[in-house]
Image (tube, rainbow, N blue to C red):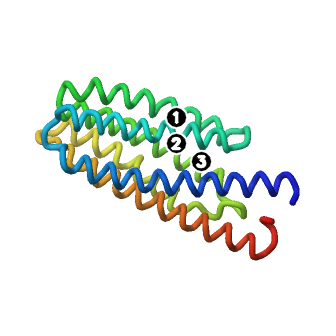
Amino acid sequence: MSSPARTAVSERSTLLRLYLGRGILAVVWAVAFAGVHEDLGAAAITLLVVHPAIDSVSSLLDHRATPDGFERRVIALNGILSALAAAALRAAGTHGVAPVLHVFGAWALVSGLAQVLVGLRRRGPEFGRQCPTLVSGALSFLVGITYNIQAAGDSPSLGVLSVYATGGGVWFILQALLLGRRTRLLEAAGTAG
């Protein structure tokens, strides 16, 4: 197997595990947050910090597996912004629901845009069309705007965050399944080794 083919196989394998792990963690997070979001206490604030922290760690792992270029820089920037969002959510949690929704919304918007950019760069024969990644990123971008509008309204609620995380988790799991299918097809065709 040539070096570029070996690199592509390794990157697909890393992404498959990363997407599946992120998807499962997002769904678990959503279930946990749904049980504590009514009271913006220590458990809820801890979970609020954990969500973007997972994204930050995932970005670090993705960054390590991605060759140099624009895509890698976007992933690094997203990882840094997610770490900052985790810190900002911790601070916002002590000030109430509206500040939390503002911070989470801003992070969802930026993270969604990064996801779309990376998904567009990964489209092709090695990684497929990236439809779940693109849809998830676009929805995250739009939801981020919606959360900021809701935060400025009369009755902001954190219940929407569990729905957001569940949706994101499902999209990541779907992308992992499609990437696994792509890997099997390429292996059957003899191009992946």
Element class at badge 3: helix
CB under 8 Å between discs 1 and 2: yes
- Residue 20: percent from left, percent from top: 50, 57
Residue type, mark 3 in image = Val
Figure quadrant of residue 85: top left
Check the image and report above or below for 6 versus 154: below
State the image coordinates of residue 79 (x, y, percent, origin top left).
Answer: 52, 34
**Amino acid, disc 2:** Ser
Front-most of residues 73 and 36: 36
> Which of the two labelled residues, at mark 1 and mark 3, occupies the earlier sequence position?
1
Q: Is residue 184 above or below residue 14?
A: below
Instruction: For the residues labelled 1 and 3, say whether their Cβ atoms are less than 8 Å apart.
Output: no
- Secondary element under disc 2, as helix, strand or loop, is helix
**Sequence-first tag of 1 and 2:** 2
Nearest to N terminus: mark 3 or mark 2: 2
> In this rendering, would 187 be left or right of 87?
right
Mark 3 and mark 2: Cα distance apart in space = 14 Å
Please determine whether, in this image, residue 135 is positioned above or below residue 87. below
Q: Nearer the viewer, mark 3 or mark 2?
A: 2
The residue drawn where x is 28% and y is 23% is 91
- Circle 1 sits on which residue? 79
- Helix, strand or loop at label 1? It is helix
Q: Amino acid at mark 1?
A: Gly
* Marks 1/3: CA–CA distance: 13 Å
Looking at the image, do the residues carrying marks 3 and 2 touch, with CB atoms under 8 Å apart?
A: no
Q: Which residue is mark 2?
A: 58
Q: Quadrant of the C terminus?
A: bottom right
Which residue is at the far bottom?
188
State the residue at coordinates (74%, 55%): 8
Residue occupying the far right of the picture: 2
Q: Where is residue 82 shown, x and y percent of the image? A: 45, 34
Query: In the rendered image, which residue does mark 3 sit on?
Result: 118
